[in-house]
Structure formats: C-alpha cells, structure tokens
Amino acid sequence: MTEQWRLLQTGFKNAYSNMAIDKAILVANSEGKVPPTVRFYGWDPAAISIGYFQSLVEEVDIEACERFGVDYVRRITGGGAVFHEKELTYSIVVPESHPEIPKNIIQSYGRICGAVMKGLHQLGIESDYAPINDIVTGGRKISGNAQTRKLETVLQHGTVLMDVDVDTMFSLLKVPNEKIKDKLIADVKQRVTSLKHILGNEIRFNEVARAMKIGFEEEFDIELIEGKLSKEELALAKQFEKESFSTTEWNHRR
Amino acid sequence: MQSHSIYKVPQGKLLKISLEYDEKKNVITDIRITGDFFAYPEEAIELLETKLKNTILERKQLLEKISSFITEGQIQFIGVNAEGLTQGILMCRP
C-alpha cells in the first residue's frame, strides 16, 4: 500500500507564524506525534526572510520594510534573503531515517527539489536542479530552497515564484555596493523568472498547490492526505512565534 | 581595530566577516561570520566564532584551527569551507 503523508494547506499568514509553524511540525514529527508532512502556504503581509547566518541590518532595509508594510524574519535554515510576495511556499518535514531521504545533505536537496520540479512539470514547465539549492527553468531561477536538520528530522522549505517584483525587492534589501545597484537589479531581472512570466498569464495559488501536491506524491511515491495541525503543533507554533520569531532577540541576533 | 570583508567563495556562497583584532598582537578579539551559506548543525557557527577568539591572524594557524573544528565537531558546511573562511578572515586585515 502506498505510504500516506499529511498535507497541510495553511493559507496566507504572517512571517512569524509561518516560520513558527514549520518549526512546530519539525518538533512534533521528531517526537513521532505526526506523520511526515508537506505544507503549502503563502505570506500576508509580504515579508523578507533571511537565512540563519545572515546579518539582519546588513541585508534588510528595516526602515523601508516599515514604510512598505513588509515584515522581516530570520529563518532557522541557512541560505539567502528572500522577498516573499507572490509565491507558493512549501515545507517538507520527514525523519532523517526515512528510506526516501538520502543521508547525504546535498543529495537530499536534489530529491526534494525533484518534487518541486515534478510539480512544475504538471504546469507544463520543464526545469533543472541547480545545485545546491536552486531550481531553474531556461537557465533562470524559479525556486529557492533551504534545509535544516534538527532532532534527527529534515525540514526543507522553498519557494515557487508565481510573480516577481525585482524593483520592490531591491528597495527592501540592502546591496553591498550602492554604486552598482542598478546593474545588480538588471542582472537579477535576467536571472530570475516566474510562473506568470513563463506561462504568459497569472496562475492561481490553488492551481500551483494542486500541481505541487502531485509532484511530491510522484517524487516520494506517497499519497498526501489533507489534514490539520494538531493541537500540540498549534500550541508549539504559538510559543515559537512569541518566544523567538517575532522577537528582536531572534531577528537581530546576527 | 574593527574591519569587515565580503568574499565570494569560489563555487560557493557570499561570506561576510566582521572582525575586531588587536593590531599589536595580531590577534582576533571578536569575530562575526555571516552570509548566505549553510552549516549543519547551524549552532556550530557560534561555537566557531568563540573558538576563533585569541587566534593569531595568520593563514596556517587559522586554517588548522578551522579545519580541526570542522573535523572534530563533524560539522558540514555547504557553500563555504575552511579555506574560504580563512581567506575571508585574512581579507579583513589591510
């Protein structure tokens, strides 16, 4: 019988809540209380997330974020700063010991990115894995991904860009060298793409989610059964949101 | 003396280092390693920062200290390595 994992569709939430939920699922799964889980979500308000090792003040123009009503949050995963606006974000939580998950971290990035690529295929888009943590189509980035391993559990989250506004993104992010900012923006516009750009029209979040569900099911030979966060996960998420993700201590710690 | 470097690790990520050092003794007094790389476990970076305090700013010693930290702690860096970290640190010195 096909193995069943849980699918969570948690809708659009703020940055602190989104990051807290991913961590809560990781903790609950590590204790064997919930099955392996794939989650699809969005961001409201739009937000910047930065990698665990990044310096908030070096990467993010905090004053601009406040002016635009954009939140910012530090992730528990490494990697770079991301402007989350028009995108589908996924997360996957699964024990490190699961036979479908390679022990080798880079290989496991490849497997999980494979699920996203199979999802893109459902939308008629062919893509390539660009190690370590990107997916490209026609050489241009459509998805960025970041993984952590804690409590013998893998958490990877990543984006599928539905539309992209590079100018707004760069008004919120700091660049190392202001003199070359215009060139940098032009470069990024060349290097990044979106579902809207490829398909030629807007695509609905639910349509992307439907495609990604099939992608994950095919890649891991599983069936995703729609479920809900457990009471314990909800309580944990609330705790993590309050104690870390929404706090200055956490977000400014580096 | 306070200093800062930005170093694109070859085939890797962007490493940003903030360094405080004693010019006379040529010794690190404080260091912050930031960037868009990955490390497993993530908490290793704070331990490495602590470990690098009081290290002499010299390539061989830095490389040895960082390499042994990675091996002993079974740390896995992705997008940066001991050579990249050493280079980024040394670039903070004029």
Image: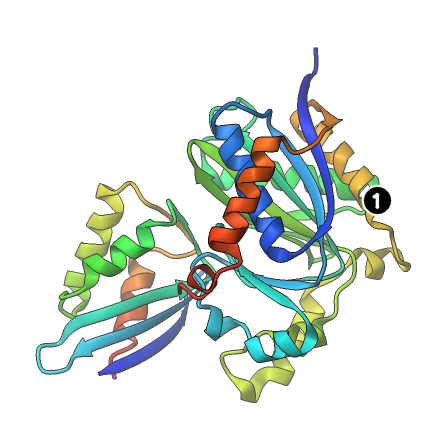
Image coordinates of residue A24 in percent, x first then y, are: 54, 39
**Residue at left 34%, top 64%?**
B33
Which residue is most to the left?
A: B25
Name the amino acid type tagged 1: Asn
Q: Give the image quarter of residue A111.
A: top right
Q: In this view, does B73 lie above or below A99?
A: below
Image coordinates of residue B77 in percent, x first then y, are: 38, 50
Chain ID at mark 1: A
Image coordinates of residue B54 in percent, x first then y, are: 13, 66
Which residue is most to the bottom?
A: A179
Mark 1 = which residue? A206
Judge the density around disc 1: few (<14), some (14-19), many (≥20) Cα neighbours within 10 Å. Answer: few
Quarter of the image where the C terminus of chain A is located: bottom left
Quarter of the image where the N terminus of chain A is located: top right
**Residue at left 51%, top 71%?**
A59
**Residue at left 57%, top 50%?**
A19
Q: In this view, does A25 lie above or below A176?
A: above
**Residue at left 65%, top 38%?**
A114
- Examine the rendering and report whether any part of residue A19 can be seen: yes
In the rendered structure, the answer to whether residue A29 lies left or right of residue B16 reads right
Image coordinates of residue A168 in percent, x first then y, are: 70, 75
